[in-house]
Amino acid sequence: MYLTVDGTTRFRAYGPRQLDEIARRYPLPDAARETVRLLSRVLPFRVNEYVLSELVDWTQVPDDPVYQLVFPQHGMLDEDDTAALRRLAGRRDGDPEVVAAVRAIRARLNPHPGGQQELNVPRDDSGPVPGLQHKYRETVLYFPGQGQTCHAYCTYCFRWAQFVGDAELRFAAPGPQELIRYLRGHPEVTDVLVTGGDPMVMTSARLRAHLEPLLEVPTVRTVRIGTKSPAYWPQRYVSDADADDVLRLFERVVASGRTLAVMAHFSHPRELATPLAQRALERIRRTGAVVYCQAPLIGHVNDSADTWSALWRAELAAGCVPYYMFVARDTGPHAYYRVPLARAVDVYQGAYRELPGLARTVRGPVMSTTLGKAVVDGVEELPEGRYFRLRLLQARDPRLVGRPFRAPWSATAAWFDELRPDAGGDDALRAALASGGAARTEALR
Ligand code: SF4
C-alpha cells in the first residue's frame, strides 16, 4: 500500500497535481475531484498515503469526517469566489489574473486571526524578530523555516497562510540564532513552543539543529512541539529512516532536565485507532516526553459529544493528556465549519460528563482571541437574562488570567467578536476588552 524502500515506508505528499492518481486508486467522485482542483488554488491541499488508506473511510465519502478534514469541499468558499475561480479554471497558475483573484480571495479569509502579525511579533533593537511570536509572558512560539509544511493539511487550518507561498503572510525563522538571542534577553520566557506547519516534517538532523541550542538557555524549562504527525504520519516515530534518531533527540531534551511536551493534534478518535498511531505514541512516551492532546471543534468533522468523549477516552487510554478543545478560529473557510458557541458548550459538557476523572484534564471550549485564551465555562440563567460565563485561561496581560466575565447568550455567535462581553465592575478587564485586547504589558515590551 505504501511506497516501500528497504522494508520501510517512505513519506510522499499528494497535492492538486496528484488528484487523478488519487482518483485512480480511491473512489474519489468526479465532482469532488473538480471541486478540490478549483478550491485548492486558494485553500492548501495536501494528503498522503497513510491518511488515504488508513484514516479516510471511503464508503462514507463525502460525509466521512477525515475526508472532510483534508479535502476542500464545495461551500468552503462563497458563491462569488467559487464562480470567479471557475471562470479562471482554464488558465495556468502564474496567469496575472489568476494570481490577483487568488490573492484577493485569500485576503478576505482573514489569514492572520488574533492580531498575530501586528501584535505578537516581538521586536528588539534591530526591529521585528523573524519567525517568533511572543503573546504570553512565559511562552514564545518559534517557527523554524524548514518546518512550515505538514504531512497533510487540515481544511480548517488557522495557520493556512504558512502554506500558500506568500512570504508576507508567513512566519519562518532561518535558524535558531535570533531565538536564542531573544531568549537570553527575556528570562521570563520559560516555555518555547516549536510550531509550524509541523516541525516534525523536518529530518531529525534539522530538528536537532533547532532544538539543541535551546538546551543552552537555562531559563527555558519546557520545550513544546506542536504537531499532528502522530495522527497524519505516525511512521515518523516508528519506521521513517530516522525515527530512532528523533526519539533519541527527545530523550536528550528530557535528559537535560527539561519537560518535553508533544502537543499532539487529534481531531477524531479514528486517528488514534490504528496500530501505527498507538505504536508511535508508545514510543514517544517511552522517551519521557508527555503527550498533550488538543484540537478544534469543527463542523462536519467532530461536532458531537459522542465523538469528543470517544476522542478523550482514546487519548487517556494511550497514556496521553486531554488538554484543549478549541473553538475554530475565524479564518479560512470558517463559515463552512463554524459551530455556534451555544452548541460548543453543549458538545463539551455532554462529552465531559461521560469522562472518567483522569480525562477531566481537558479544558474548553476555548477561543484563542487577541486578548488571550477565553474559555466558555457554561451558560447561566439570571433574572436579567441568559449569559455565557467566560474566563481567561491565558492573557496577553497576565494580571487578567482567571478573571471571570460574561456575555449575553446568543444562539448563533461562533467567535469572540460576535459576543458583547461584559466585565462588570472589573476596570482592568473592561479596559482590555475595550481595546480589543491589543494592549501589551510592560513585561512583554
Ligand atoms: S496540522 Fe496544524 S498546521 Fe498543519 S494543516 Fe493541520 S491545523 Fe494546520
Image: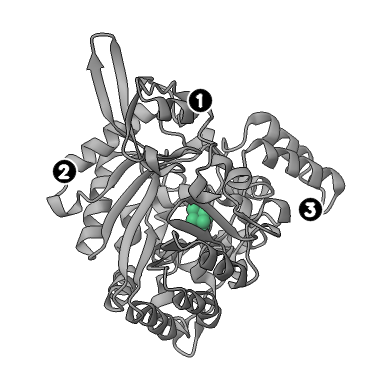
> Of the numbered discs in the image, which one, if any, rests on residue 354?
2
> Callout 1, which amino acid?
Ala
Name the residue rendered at 63%, 65% in the picture.
173
Report the residue that reaches farthest toward the right.
96
Observer-side mark, 1 or 2, equals: 1
Name the residue rendered at 43%, 85% in the picture.
245
User: What percent of the width, then of the height, locates residue 208?
Assistant: 50, 80
User: What percent of the width, then of the height, locates residue 20?
Assistant: 63, 60
Q: Answer yes or no: is residue 156 visible.
A: no
Q: Can you identify the residue that label 1 sits on? A: 434
User: What percent of the width, then of the height, locates residue 418?
Assistant: 48, 24
Name the residue rendered at 56%, 51% in the picture.
159
Label 2 packing within 10 angstroms: few (<14), some (14-19), many (20+) = some
Observer-side mark, 3 or 2, equals: 2
What is the C-alpha distance between the residues marked 3 and 1?
A: 43 Å
Name the residue rendered at 32%, 24% in the picture.
388
Which secondary structure lies at badge 3? loop
Residue closer to the observer: 64 or 132: 132
